[in-house]
């Protein structure tokens, strides 16, 4: 398995970097969690790895290098009803790695399919991923279509309404995010965690030797599903 080459050590910094009024972290010594496989798919350079780094470390860096194969990360979220452990597979977007990707999405219960709102081609590619995933993975896979880079809204090429309509027609969750500013990133993972916990088809595992996120979004009871900029 390849790795995302980055100048930050994800695991090492995980505990110290999680911060902010919406987030606290506590040790998870003996608790049980529902474990789900989550895969990120999308064209190269749309910001898949940046979304993971933003979510896990609350950081953004301009000098991430392209993922080779896939990168792995895990994160546990504490909901009112359950602990949800994500096994996150961040796949490489470059076409030369496409043939490897089924290895990473196989058995996934959830997917974040990412496009860049400034790049129409990446939206077309995202649609291809939706079709492929629905065909290849079980039909119950929960998919969040995510338009990233909303901080670049002046260069927007994919209208929010068009993507939202496509998502609705294809029964996908829909979000727009910015890994750079952090806009809506937690909401994507948190909403997926809630949906997966509702379906309750995860594997039960011990959430030991890890940190748990306790997410308190401002709109916890009414999680925002889309944000048009
Ligand atoms: N302005 C802006 N730039 C972003 C955002 N997210 C990612 N980027 C930049 O976009 C480039 C690609 O980001 P990555 O996270 O490496 O993209 P990726 O989809 O993982 O790319 P591959 O590994 O090639 O598949 C980097 O230069 C990031 O800094 C964002 O929300 N806003």
Image (cartoon, grey):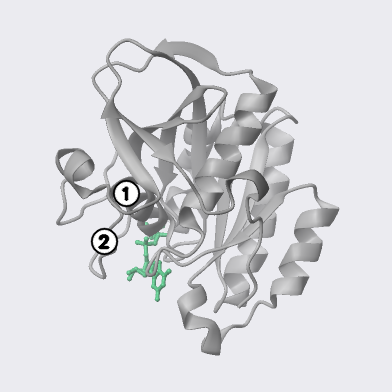
Residue at (60, 78) in percent of width and height:
229
Q: Which quarter of the rendering shows the N terminus?
A: top left
Assess mark 2: CB under 8 A from ligand 1?
Answer: yes
Regarding mark 2 in the picture, which secondary structure is present there? loop
Separation of residues labelled 1 and 2 (CA atoms): 9 Å
- Return the residue nearer the eye: 148 or 65: 148
Relative to residue 123, is residue 152 drawn left or right? left
Q: Which residue is mark 2?
A: 65
Residue at (66, 31) in percent of width and height:
137
Q: Residue furthest bottom?
A: 154
**Is the residue 165 above or below the residue 19 in the image?**
below
Label 2: how many Cα within 10 Å (few below 14, some 14–19, many 20+):
few
The numbered mark at residue 149 is: none
- Return the residue nearer the eye: 69 or 167: 167
Residue at (63, 50) in percent of width and height:
223
Q: Which residue is mark 1?
A: 68
Residue 74 image point, x, y percent: 35, 32
- The quadrant where residue 192 appears: top right
Regarding mark 1 in the picture, which secondary structure is present there? loop
Q: Between tags 1 and 2, which lies in front?
A: 2
**Is the residue 91 above or below the residue 205 in the image?**
below
- The quadrant where residue 179 appears: bottom left
């Amino acid at each position: 398995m390849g790795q995302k080459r980055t100048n930050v050590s994800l695991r090492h910094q995980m505990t110290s970097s999680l911060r902010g009024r919406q987030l606290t972290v506590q040790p998870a010594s003996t608790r049980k969690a529902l474990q789900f496989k989550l895969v990120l798919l999308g064209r190269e350079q749309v910001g898949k790895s940046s979304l993971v780094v933003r979510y896990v470390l609350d950081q953004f860096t301009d000098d991430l290098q392209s993922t080779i194969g896939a990168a792995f990360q895990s994160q546990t979220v504490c909901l009112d009803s359950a602990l949800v452990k994500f096994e996150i597979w961040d796949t490489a977007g470059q076409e030369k790695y496409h043939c490897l990707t089924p290895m990473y999405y196989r058995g996934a219960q959830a997917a974040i399919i990412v496009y860049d709102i400034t790049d129409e081609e990446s939206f077309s590619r995202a649609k291809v991923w939706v079709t492929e995933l629905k065909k290849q993975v079980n039909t119950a896979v929960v998919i969040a279509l995510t338009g990233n880079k909303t901080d670049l809204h002046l260069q927007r090429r994919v209208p929010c309404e068009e993507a939202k309509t496509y998502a609705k027609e294809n029964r996908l969750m829909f979000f727009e995010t910015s890994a750079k500013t952090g806009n809506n990133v937690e909401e994507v993972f948190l909403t997926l965690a809630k949906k997966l916990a509702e379906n309750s088809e995860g594997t039960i595992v011990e959430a030991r030797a890890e940190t748990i996120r306790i997410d308190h979004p401002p709109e916890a009871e009414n999680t925002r599903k889309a944000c048009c900029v």
